[in-house]
Amino acid sequence: MNDFLRITPRQEDISGQPILRPLPSAKCRSVGPFVFFDHILENTYPAGSGMNINQHPHIGLSTLTYLFEGQLQHKDSLGSDQVVSPGEVSWMTAGKAVAHVERTPHSLQQSGSRMHGLQVWLAMPAADEQGEPSYSHHPASNLPRSTSMGVDICLIAGTGFCLQSPVPVCSPTVYAEIKLAAGAALQIPAEHAERALYLIDGEATLDDQQLPLRGLLVLPEGEAYTLSACSESHLVLIGGAPIGPRRINWNFVASDQALIDQARQRWAAQDWPTVPGETARIELPR
């Protein structure tokens, strides 16, 4: 029997939006560069409401937002103002300091909307974590896909399955959306040292092991496995090269505690880049 690590996500709520968060956990702090994994659960916002996460800071990480339903407006201290739709990638690299806002676009706040998707944080290599921030948006049509024998793969970021995403990751990474028809199978190669599967919907097995629904299954290094769908299934594969120990404090990620302490002091003192046109901000938690 394979020795897989199973992680049950904890339930959280962010400004009224329910999420499941398997990373980080006491059992597993990271998978490759992935240090944070939020499953933004299916949620219906009635007319006159929506997600609204005010201005907040980041250091030492890249955020990647990928939606299945709904839209999000991303605004940041670089001047970016982008509406993100399903199948698109919103990629923000924080570097030494960035602030951003995430909210339901005004038009959908008026009409009401649905929300469902994923947001992950990828830790930056120590040599780059104090670099300049950046933002890029990648339309669905620019993401590479492979479709064969009931298997549909979209490579969201990194490399894998003979595909390469245009998202400018900072270290070896794989982040793939996988959709399987009932009865379809896919080999999960050992091309990346650290890997984990998250089953969003459906029923699937990895070799002889049942995948936990909406749980993270961490794979041992160096072995290939066969993913098989017992019913129509929707999953993501995350992983990459080990990033090394990282400290996480609120919205800050760093290899050195001193960088986090400095960031907390700066945000508290309002010595931070601001998002144009935004005044509301999330204050530093005690």
Image (cartoon, rainbow, N blue to C red):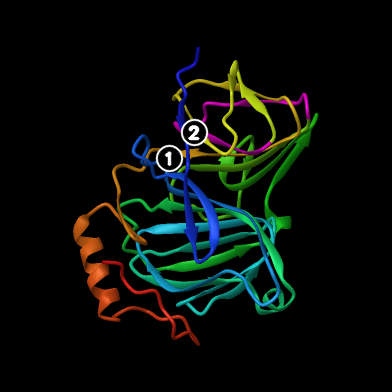
Q: Residue furthest top?
A: 1
Residue at image coords 35%, 70%: 97
Q: Residues within 10 Å of mark 2 (few under 14, many from 20)?
A: many
Find residue 66 and report its horizontal and vertical position in percent. Answer: 61, 55
Helix, strand or loop for disc 2: strand
Look at the numbered discs 2 and 1 and tell me whether their residues touch, using CB distance below 8 Å: yes
Q: Residue furthest left?
A: 258
Residue at image coords 62%, 71%: 50
Find residue 77 and report its horizontal and vertical position in percent. Answer: 45, 77
- Snapshot quadrant of residue 194: top left
Q: Nearer the viewer, residue 271 or 128?
A: 271
Q: Nearer the viewer, residue 143 or 257?
A: 257
Magenta region includes residue 163: no
Q: CA distance from mark 2 to mark 1?
A: 7 Å
Q: What residue sits right under mark 1 in the picture?
A: 32
Q: Is residue 166 left or right of residue 93?
A: right
Residue at image coords 35%, 51%: 125
Q: Is residue 70 left or right of residue 188?
A: right
Magenta region includes residue 184: yes
Q: Which residues are magenta?
A: 182-201
Q: Is residue 174 left or right of residue 284?
A: right
Q: Residues within 10 Å of mark 1 (few under 14, many from 20)?
A: many
User: Any mark on residue 195, and which?
Assistant: 2
- Snapshot quadrant of residue 281: bottom left
Find residue 58 and report its horizontal and vertical position in percent. Answer: 38, 65
Helix, strand or loop for disc 1: loop
Amino acid type at circle 2 is: Arg
Amino acid type at circle 1 is: Gly
Residue at image coords 50%, 12%: 1
Tell me which label, 2 or 1, sits earlier in the chain: 1
Q: Is residue 87 above or below residue 268?
A: above
- Snapshot quadrant of residue 25: top left
